[in-house]
Image: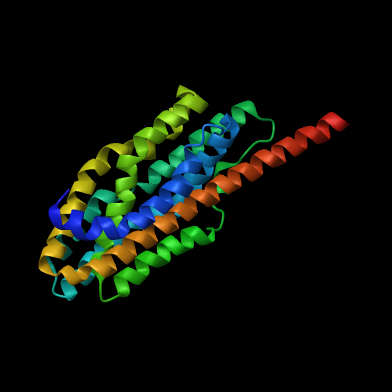
């Protein structure tokens, strides 16, 4: 880890990282999760996640343009170039949704509709995630976009491989057909995280007072993303409960 990121940024963001680990990470890695719960969680994660992923290219590019307007031309140029790497990643989530729905429907009489799931309104957590990006872009600290990317892409690196293993353990190898987005980001975000950390270091070298908006944005991103994962889990559990209730009704007839 770069020295200023390690000494200035990491200690201040640790509470938010610990909070995410205690809540969202613990929930999605729960060994008591059933195969139905896991599949439904992944379906909600993928379908709801499209609206969190499709705008990413634009968010990063616009943040870069705002940095340039504020006189931070180096970070502005870097963000604009980096934004191009995020184009069309939402298409993987759409395909994952369809594959996971096909997998689920193979084993259940109550069929799901992928197009219906993809057209649902966003929950508050997804709206909060989008609002955070827009607020940062409009603020006097658009460079804080780097901290958002550092924390969220860092999750793909630290949590992604472990979660993929968890999915295979509970859902079997066939579940991998619906994990293209997660698998891709677990691989490519290694490089992205190194890029983000270097840009954080350069910002703090330029002005150590940048630390507060960076930490605020990074922590808010973790909280919003944790909320999104929590919403996806809650919907999956509600679906499983409705499925159980339906079975009980059939058994009682």
Judged left or right of residue 16, residue 190 is: left
> Residue 33 placed where, x, y %?
56, 34
Q: How is the image coloured?
A: rainbow
Q: In this rendering, does residue 54 appear at all? A: no
Which quadrant of the figure contains the C terminus?
Answer: top right
- Furthest-right residue in view? 253
Judged left or right of residue 75, residue 239 is: right
Against 101, residue 12 (above or below) is below
> Residue 73 placed where, x, y %?
12, 68
Which residue occupies 82% across, 36% down? 249
> Residue 67 placed where, x, y %?
19, 70
Which residue occupies 54% across, 29% down? 103
Judged left or right of residue 176, residue 136 is: left
Q: In this rendering, does residue 164 appear at all? A: yes
Which residue occupies 11% across, 64% down? 205
The foreground one among 158 and 188 is 158
Which residue occupies 21% across, 65% down? 64
**How many dots with numbers?**
0
Judged left or right of residue 214, residue 222 is: right
- Furthest-top residue in view? 173
Q: Answer with the quarter of the image where residue 251 lies.
A: top right
> Residue 20 placed where, x, y %?
42, 51
């Amino acid at each position: 880890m770069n020295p200023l990121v390690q000494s200035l940024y990491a200690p201040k963001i640790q509470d938010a990282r610990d909070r995410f680990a205690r809540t969202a990470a613990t929930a999605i890695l729960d060994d008591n999760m059933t195969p139905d719960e896991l599949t439904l969680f992944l379906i909600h994660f993928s379908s709801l996640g499209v609206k969190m992923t499709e705008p990413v290219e634009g968010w990063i590019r616009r943040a870069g343009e705002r940095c340039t307007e504020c006189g931070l031309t180096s970070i502005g140029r870097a963000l604009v170039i980096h934004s191009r790497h995020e184009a069309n990643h939402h298409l993987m989530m759409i395909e994952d949704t369809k594959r996971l729905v096909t997998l689920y429907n193979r084993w259940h009489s109550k069929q799901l509709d992928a197009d219906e799931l993809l057209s649902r309104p966003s929950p508050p957590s997804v709206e909060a995630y989008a609002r955070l990006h827009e607020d940062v872009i409009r603020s006097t600290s658009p460079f804080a976009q780097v901290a958002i990317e550092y924390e969220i892409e860092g999750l793909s690196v630290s949590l992604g491989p472990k979660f993929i293993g968890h999915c295979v353990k509970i859902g079997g190898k066939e579940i991998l057909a619906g994990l293209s987005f997660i698998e891709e980001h677990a691989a490519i975000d290694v490089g992205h995280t190194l890029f983000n950390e270097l840009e954080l270091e350069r910002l703090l070298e330029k002005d150590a007072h940048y630390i507060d908006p960076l930490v605020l944005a990074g922590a808010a991103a973790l909280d919003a993303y944790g909320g999104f994962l929590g919403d996806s889990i809650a919907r999956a559990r509600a679906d499983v409960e409705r499925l159980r209730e339906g079975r009980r009704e059939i058994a009682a007839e």
